[in-house]
Every structure is written in C-alpha cells, then in structure tokens.
Image (spheres, grey):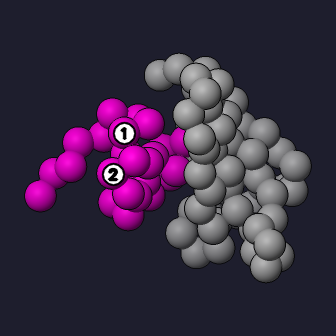
Amino acid sequence: MKKTCIRIGRDINGKKVARFNSVTGKRGFSIQTNGNTPSLHRKAIGDTIAAHTELECWREFLSYVKEFGTSRQKAFFDLSEEK
C-alpha cells in the first residue's frame, strides 16, 4: 500500500467523516463514520491515522469500502469486485 492516511473531520452538514487521502495524486474520498465505523467514530476531530497504524481502524475502514465502496474507491486498495 502506498503512503496514505485517514483524517477525522466534519462534512458540510456537521457529520463526522473519515477522509481518505493518498499522496499518489489521486483524488481522495470520505465516508460518514456514525454507525458504519465505530472505532473511527470514537476518534477526535483532527486526528490522523497513518497507514499501518491503529490496525483496527484500518480494518474497519477497508471492510466498509470493500462492502459498500464504489469501484473507484475499491481501486485505491486493489479490492476485487467479488459478486
């Protein structure tokens, strides 16, 4: 996996989100954390979770993207489109 990080913030409506950023120049994306990713939701606004740290948060994020993410989001992590 390339150098990546997840930042915790708020969206335009004030809901807590996990923003995925990649340093490869690709456009990142965000997901709301409310009931979908409890360990990420417990993080404070402004926290940064670097790749290969806090593995529970990353597992939760990746499993969410694998199940509900778009094909573009899945392509960031080389997740297959299993049917």
Find residue 56 and report its image quarter. Answer: top right
Find residue 27 and report its image quarter. Answer: top right
Q: Residue furthest bottom?
A: 13
The relative height of residue 69 versus residue 36 in the rendered view (above or below) is: above
The residue indicated by pointer 1 is 75
Could you tell me the amino acid type at mark 1? Ala
Badge 1 crowding class, 10 Å Cα cut-off, few under 14, some 14 to 19, many 20 or more, is few
28 relative to 74 in the view: left or right: right
49 relative to 4 in the view: left or right: right
**Residue drawn at 83 percent across, 45 percent down:** 47
- Rendered location of residue 19, percent (x, y): 68, 50
Q: How many discs appear?
A: 2
Could you tell me the amino acid type at mark 2? Ser
The residue indicated by pointer 2 is 71
Q: Is residue 54 visible?
A: no
The magenta segment is 58-83
- Would you say the residues marked 1 and 2 are in contact, meaning their CB atoms lie under 8 Å apart? yes
